[in-house]
Image: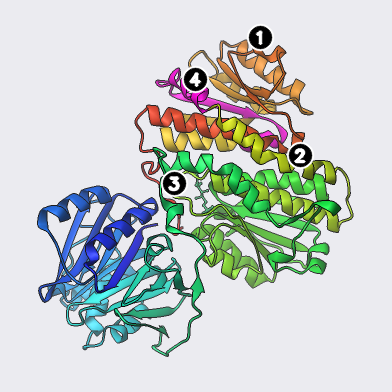
């Protein structure tokens, strides 16, 4: 959570910092601030609220300078307020910094620093770092940072400047991400690559316990003890265009519409059609080790967890390997029993989610082999796993995950088919792969229903509760549909497997609680119809997602959204789309901040 940025170079940093913060705003958006070298001092400006407010305030003051820092915050310690907004500074404005993460021993450090005469301005944990760096500052910023970070416990990515060393930014990382970009006479650091794309494609990702020292003409690296280190420069393949809205009202809508392409790109080059084979070599795990797997555990949070739930059906049905799916926040405290036959799969869009990363580190210690399904190259989870299956979804800016979910489902489906062929399970493989190759076109056709779904959503503007029902492979999609509605429209939504209704949730049904029922013609169709009838018998309003051509369902429900016919295992790729569109349209009609829903942040880098 929180986004940090720093720029040192020949240009006025303000527009660069503001532009960068806008691209990082999905990481947190309750307050923001910048600090720049100007007129022999460091000037700081902070606001409670969004980057647009900061931008307005800066315009009024006409701030100008050479090098600077920026921050967008997701509050952990201290309420969202101007005082608690970053950048934070030491006494007398000697040291100024931005921080992403949590300092767990800040109470102790603060007591000590207070006793030594330091004066604090905020309730944050971050401010202690500024005072600590100041304490050790004797004319060389990197030396002071290196001493200070050795006393910090917790997680941090910090960018620090000193009034006495204009043009220099010192960055240190332990936990949250930090990436530096090499420009021409200018260098830049940020929490992720998005703000860097307009300036350079040459970057280096900091590892834990590394420090980067940026000036306009060079970037040097050391470890926390100050020992120089060499870093490999990576060339980025993402382009600045990928993070523009391109005519869509919101990033979320653009990302929903990108799904056909994302599914194509995630399967691209991974399917050998003549042999109905999926190629898993690129994951970095050897085929012989994959062949030995007797059990899988999938570990993830939120939407990625829902992808894991569907992945379980895929792997168990196709490869006949048992799968356990666990929330990362729970798994990290599990008593994991090490064995040589389990593959732990970590599903994460960002590759930085704190709980997922902690779970990965735990299984690594126990010697389990690990595979990441991840969208961000060089993210912590991608780097630390034994193998990676990249989802090629491109950057996702909307806080609610959409296209990356489709990409994760694609990856999990391909993984399941790949494991099935290693287990010599030929069943239905060819049929399935052929059906799967049609999915991008079918998703495209479904996107054409947006106007109809928008009109439908208008009927529920004032609805307070929703129920989502699905069975078998569509149950994880019911969960995902409900999550989308909750997070962006703030309407309460519950999802259940249809058969579970009569064990409690049916008590909720009345004419004010509509039900979204996923009811394609698959092996649980009749069962799902019975569940729908149970809802109707209690005056519930039902919208059904049904297979094209299912005319009879029209008489049983209030509204039908038709889905093209596909292999039953692949329906989730289709049923998902109207649910995303419904949540989007309803939230947009309610005037909600679709791309940046309240209280949320895209990368949850704190526990
Ligand atoms: C919901 C959403 C979150 C994330 C979750 C995990 O729309 O985006 O629930 O899925 O925070 O994030 P990653 O996949 O980055 O580990």
Looking at the image, which residue is at 52% across and 58% down? 355
Residue 192, located in which quarter of the rendered image?
bottom left
Residue hosting label 1: 555
Q: Are marks 3 and 1 in contact (CB under 8 Å)?
A: no
Query: Percent position (x, y) of residue 386?
Result: 66, 69
Report whether the residue tagged 4 is closer than 8 Å to ligand 1: no
Residue hosting label 3: 399
N-terminal label among 4 and 1: 4
For the residues carrying marks 3 and 4, which lies nearer the camera in this image? 4
Query: Percent position (x, y) of residue 126?
Result: 29, 66
Few, some or many residues within 10 Å of mark 3 (<14, 14–19, 20+): many
Tell me the distance, in whole angstroms, between the alpha carbons under discs 2 and 1. 30 Å
- Does 533 sit left or right of 432 as displayed? left
N-terminal label among 3 and 4: 3
Magenta span includes 406: no
Of residue 260 and residue 426, the one placed in the foreground of this image is: 260
Element type at mark 1:
helix
- Does 372 sit left or right of 24 as displayed? right
Element type at mark 2:
helix
Which region shows up in magenta?
A: 450-478
Work out whether residue 197 can be spotted. Answer: yes
């Amino acid at each position: 959570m929180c986004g940090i940025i720093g720029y040192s170079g020949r240009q006025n940093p303000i527009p660069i910092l503001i532009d960068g913060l806008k691209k990082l705003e999905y990481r947190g958006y309750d307050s923001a601030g910048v600090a720049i070298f100007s007129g022999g001092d460091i000037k700081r400006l902070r606001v409670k609220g969004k980057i647009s407010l900061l931008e307005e305030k800066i315009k009024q003051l006409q701030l100008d300078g050479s090098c600077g820092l920026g921050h967008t915050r997701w509050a952990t310690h201290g309420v969202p307020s101007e005082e608690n907004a970053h950048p934070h500074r030491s006494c007398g404005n000697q040291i100024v910094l931005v921080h992403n993460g949590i300092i767990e021993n800040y109470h102790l450090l603060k007591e000590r620093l207070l006793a030594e005469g330091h004066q604090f301005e905020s309730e944050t944990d971050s401010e202690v770092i500024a005072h600590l760096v100041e304490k050790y500052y004797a004319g060389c910023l990197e030396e002071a940072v290196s001493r200070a970070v050795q006393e910090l416990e917790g997680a941090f990515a910090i960018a620090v400047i000193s009034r006495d060393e204009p043009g220099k930014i010192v960055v240190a990382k332990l936990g949250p991400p930090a990436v530096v970009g090499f420009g021409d006479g200018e260098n830049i650091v940020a929490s992720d690559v998005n703000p860097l794309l307009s300036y350079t494609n040459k970057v280096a990702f900091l590892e834990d316990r590394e420090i980067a020292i940026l000036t306009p003409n060079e970037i040097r690296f050391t470890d926390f003890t100050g020992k120089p280190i060499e870093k490999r420069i990576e060339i980025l393949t993402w382009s600045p265009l990928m993070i523009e809205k391109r005519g869509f009202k919101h990033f979320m809508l653009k990302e929903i519409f990108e799904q056909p392409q994302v599914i194509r790109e995630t399967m691209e080059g991974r399917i050998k059609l003549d042999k109905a084979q999926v190629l898993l070599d690129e994951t970095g795990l050897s085929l012989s080790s994959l062949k030995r797997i007797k059990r899988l555990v999938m570990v993830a949070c939120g939407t990625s967890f829902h992808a894991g739930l569907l992945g379980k059906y895929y792997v168990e049905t196709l490869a006949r390997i048992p799968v356990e799916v666990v929330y990362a926040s729970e798994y990290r405290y599990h008593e994991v029993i090490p064995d040589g036959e389990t593959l732990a799969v970590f599903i994460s869009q960002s590759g930085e989610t704190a709980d997922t990363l902690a779970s990965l580190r735990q299984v690594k210690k126990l010697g389990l082999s690990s595979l990441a399904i991840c969208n961000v190259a060089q993210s912590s989870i991608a780097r630390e796993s034994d193998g990676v299956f990249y989802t090629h979804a491109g950057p996702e800016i909307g806080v609610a995950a959409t296209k990356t979910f489709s990409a994760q489902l694609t990856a999990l489906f391909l993984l399941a088919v790949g494991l099935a062929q290693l287990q010599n399970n030929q069943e239905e493989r060819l049929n399935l792969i052929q059906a799967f190759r049609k999915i991008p076109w079918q998703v495209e056709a479904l996107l054409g229903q947006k106007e109809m779904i928008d009109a439908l959503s208008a009927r529920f503007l004032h609805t307070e509760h929703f129920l989502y029902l699905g069975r078998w492979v569509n149950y994880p999609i019911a969960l995902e549909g409900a999550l989308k509605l909750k997070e962006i429209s703030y309407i309460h939504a519950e999802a259940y497997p249809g058969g579970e209704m009569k064990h409690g949730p049916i008590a909720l049904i009345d004419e004010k609680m509509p039900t979204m029922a996923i009811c394609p013609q698959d092996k649980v169709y009749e069962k799902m119809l019975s569940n729908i009838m149970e809802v109707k018998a209690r005056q519930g309003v039902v919208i059904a997602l049904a297979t094209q051509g299912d005319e009879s369902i029209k008489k049983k429900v209030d509204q039908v959204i038709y889905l093209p016919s596909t292999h039953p295992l692949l329906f989730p790729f289709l049923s998902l789309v109207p649910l995303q569109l419904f949540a989007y349209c309803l939230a947009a009609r309610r005037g909600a901040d679709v791309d940046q829903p309240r209280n949320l942040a895209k990368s949850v880098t704190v526990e």
